[in-house]
Image (cartoon, helix red, strand yellow):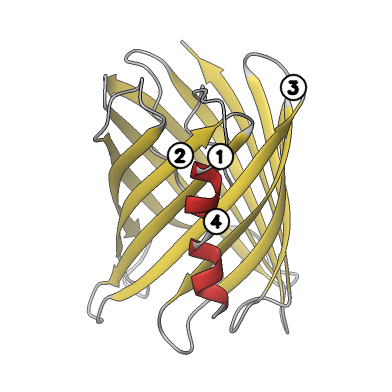
Amino acid sequence: MLKRLVFACLPVACALPNTVQAHHGLDFILVQTAHLPERGSGYAFARLNHLSESEDETEIEPAVLYGAADRIAVEAHAHYAKEGGGSFAYESIAPAVHFRLTSRERPLAVGISAEYAFASGSGSADVADVAAIAGYERGRWMAAANLLYEKLSGAAGEWGYAAGIRRTFGLKHGIGVEALGSFESDGYSEMMVGYYGELSEQFTINAGIGTKIDEGPDQAFHMTFIWRFK
């Protein structure tokens, strides 16, 4: 029931007045949108994820996203993680490609993205991810939903979802609600409240606090630092 309520956010936002377009492709924290940088411009960003369960886990993901064409962007990011009181260790490097299927002028943004994470050692599995993306903007509101597919090398694939809705206050600050989860009965799931702040034309910070829906972390903290370049 809760997962169906999450998906209901998208049509609710579509009924709101006054259309505008977002200006970057990192509009949420857990949810992807099809807003891509213009050709020749891009973003350097870093994500910090901290999950609290029986043993805490912290992950850092430095990344670069570059507009290769009007509706195509390429990305590369790395994963570093530590558990408990241990040290950070390099886990994987992941190239990705993002496609926007609708024009930039339309409030409905539809796209698809794919990435492949190459694990650091033979003891870890490579991971392939594909996401179908839909989003809509109207006035100060934005909503997005993702259908996710993930496959570890040597294992069966799993389907999941992500969805979110946010509202901007003033010109530079916003708050929202996001959810991420698996359609598997014992899969990871999380509900999060987020803050999205544009500190300058080049620099943005997104941060969120989450908790599990079904299976997932007892508590989660996420932060993304974003720098826009041309």
Q: What is the total number of numbered labels drawn onto the structure image?
A: 4
Q: Nearer the viewer, residue 97 or 10?
A: 10
Kind of residue at disc 3 = Leu
Residue positioned 38% across, 50% down in the render: 93
Q: Which residue is mark 1?
A: 142
Mark 1 and 2 residues: CB-CB less than 8 Å, in contact?
A: yes
Mark 4 and 3 residues: CB-CB less than 8 Å, in contact?
A: no
Q: Nearer the viewer, residue 27 or 122?
A: 27
Instruction: State the image coordinates of residue 163 (x, y, percent, origin top left).
Output: 51, 57
Based on the displayed image, in which of its 4 quarters is residue 28 positioned? top right
Any part of residue 30 in sight: no
Kind of residue at disc 4 = Cys
Q: Which mark is residue 136?
A: 2
In 3D space, how far apart are the residues under numbered discs 4 and 2 (Cα atoms)? 10 Å
Q: Give the mark nearest the N terminus, 4 or 2.
A: 4
Residue positioned 33% across, 56% down in the render: 117
Q: Give the mark nearest the N terminus, 4 or 3.
A: 4
Q: Which mark is residue 199?
A: 3
In 3D space, how far apart are the residues under numbered discs 1 and 3 (Cα atoms)? 19 Å
Q: Give the mark nearest the N terminus, 3 or 2.
A: 2
Q: Which element is circle 3 on?
A: loop
Location of residue 180 with respect to 132 vertically, above or below: below
Q: Which element is circle 4 on?
A: helix
